[in-house]
Image (cartoon, helix red, strand yellow):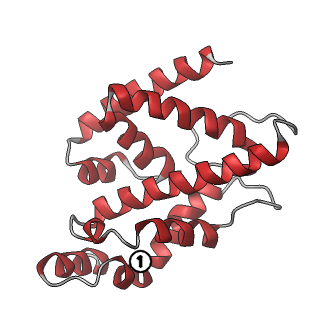
């Protein structure tokens, strides 16, 4: 059992101090998650690893519930928070550029997101994910865990309390639907 899992279990059983007590212990794991997200970021990136971790933390700090369901659930919640931070950064970047600059392409094959290079595509992905959420919330959660959180199939299965086979199926269906949706929009 990892120390993170042990801490989360302790927090489940007692009056939990919440995310505030947890983050210092798992800061390195959150930084690794954020680093995977920003690995393809340009040198003059608009958002850095530390900033992404801190912004995600701010979005999670008031929700003690994320610490009570275990390690995988916590990291799924962190992935969802990072998605929100990246989308907000992309919106700001896109508004600043007003659609100018070089064109880059974002695919769901990549587990890394560059806010600078992919602001427009990230916003399109977010719009498509919101549409997909009307059809399948679980598929969107799978995309958040796998794409935004860089989680494995097994980690995603634990976080969402489904089988690995279900995650693989949802991942394939979500990617196909998103590909069709994004391709239709050009």
Q: Which residue is located at x 25 percent, y 41 percent?
A: 164
Above or below, comparing residue 27 to residue 102 in the picture: below
Q: Which quadrant of the rendered structure holds the C terminus?
A: top right
Q: Residues within 10 Å of mark 1 (few under 14, many from 20)?
A: some
Residue 87 at least partly seen: yes
Q: Quadrant of residue 162?
A: top left
From the viewer's perspective, tell me whether residue 42 is left or right of residue 150. right
Q: Which residue is located at x 49 percent, y 76 percent?
A: 28
Above or below, comparing residue 8 to residue 80 in the picture: below
Q: Which residue is located at x 77 percent, y 59 percent?
A: 45
Q: Which quadrant of the rendered structure holds the N terminus?
A: bottom left
Q: Quadrant of residue 77?
A: bottom left
Nearer the observer, 64 or 8: 64
**Which residue, as the protein is rendered here, is positioned at the far left?**
13
Q: Position of residue 58 (x, y in %)?
A: 49, 71
Q: Secondary structure at mark 1?
A: helix
Residue 108 at least partly seen: no
Q: Position of residue 55 (x, y in %)?
A: 55, 67
């Amino acid at each position: 059992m990892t120390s993170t899992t042990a801490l989360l279990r302790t927090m489940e059983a007692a009056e939990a101090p919440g995310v505030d007590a947890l983050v210092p212990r798992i800061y390195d794991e959150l930084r690794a998650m954020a680093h995977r997200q920003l690995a393809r970021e340009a040198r003059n990136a608009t958002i850095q690893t530390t900033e992404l971790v801190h912004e995600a933390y701010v979005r999670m700090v008031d929700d003690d519930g994320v610490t009570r369901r275990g390690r995988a659930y916590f990291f799924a919640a962190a992935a969802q928070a990072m998605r929100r931070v990246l989308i907000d950064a992309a919106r700001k970047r896109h508004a600043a550029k007003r659609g100018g600059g070089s064109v880059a392409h974002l695919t769901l094959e990549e587990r890394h997101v560059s806010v600078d290079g992919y602001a427009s595509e990230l916003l399109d992905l977010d719009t498509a994910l919101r549409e997909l959420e009307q059809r399948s919330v679980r598929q969107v959660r799978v995309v958040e865990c796998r794409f935004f959180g860089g989680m494995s199939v097994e980690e995603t299965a634990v976080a969402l309390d489904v089988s690995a086979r279900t995650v693989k199926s949802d991942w394939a269906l979500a990617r196909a639907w998103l590909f069709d949706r994004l391709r239709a929009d050009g």
